[in-house]
Amino acid sequence: MFLDVLIQIIGFVGIALNILSVQFNTHWKIMLFKTLGSMTFVIQYILLGAWVGMVMDLIGSIRNIIFTLNVKNGKSNKWWIVFFSLITLIAGVTTIAMTWDKSIGYASNWSNNANTVVIIAVSISIISIVAKLLTTIAYGFKNPHVIRMVNLPSNACWVIYNLVAFSIAGVINDLMCLGSIVIAEIRFRKKTVNNTDNNI
């Protein structure tokens, strides 16, 4: 019981960090809070036994640090995007193969039909990889607007993964992150319009 509560508390800490991340309008601040949020969810996924999600978030954290340093130093992330996309694919497929029983276990909570269970297990595994590939592309860009826009489908993918994995905090996190992205876009667009009006 205590462990179950602890797992969800850890998830809610991750929620706060991820929601805050998109409210900044500089690359390094977005990456800082995204990395802290991802590492928080690495801990939660370990405790849940959701190994595919854990591996994806761990790779994502390392990727974020490298991308941040490159942007800070004015270097291109083009080849790093390719590299981390390949790593994400390889790690994702390997983790799926190694933890297939766990994925089947999650999927069996949603159906008694063997074929449906396999389809759900494969789908959520692929979804987690697609989500990380999207953020790999997004975080390689310096523009905060691009980061937020590509995060929209990524967060939608994680909603589905976390729902199947019964990560309540994860589902709430990604739903709230979707809302936070919309709020941030409205807020920063208003600032841009106001600055433009003031310069006329």
Image: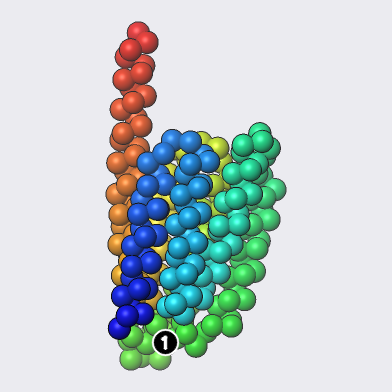
Which of the image's four quarters has the C terminus?
top left
* Residue 76 to residue 79: above or below: above
**Which residue shows up at 42% across the image and 87% down it?**
105
Question: Residue 172 in the image: x percent, y percent?
Answer: 30, 62
* Residue 29 to residue 194: above or below: below
Question: Residue 150 in the image: x percent, y percent?
Answer: 46, 48
Work out which residue is located at the far front of the displayed protein and give it: 2
Which of the image's four quarters has the N terminus?
bottom left
**Which residue shows up at 46% across the image and 49% down it?**
33
Colour pattern: rainbow
Question: Which amino acid, mark 1?
Answer: Gly
Residue 85 appears in view? yes
* Residue 38 to residue 2: above or below: above
**Which residue shows up at 55% across the image and 78% down it?**
96
**Disc 1 crowd, CA 10 A, few/some/many (<14, 14-19, 20+):** some
Question: Residue 39 in the image: x percent, y percent?
Answer: 50, 61
Q: Quadrant of residue 123?
A: bottom left
* Residue 38 to residue 108: above or below: above
**Which residue shows up at 36% across the image and 80% down it?**
3
Work out which residue is located at the far top of the displayed protein and give it: 200
Question: Residue 180 in the image: x percent, y percent?
Answer: 32, 47
The residue that disc 1 covers is 105
- Whether residue 43 sits left or right of residue 7 in the image: it is right
Q: Quadrant of residue 176?
A: bottom left
| Label 1: element kind | helix
Residue 160 appears in view? no
- Whether residue 99 sits left or right of residue 193 in the image: it is right
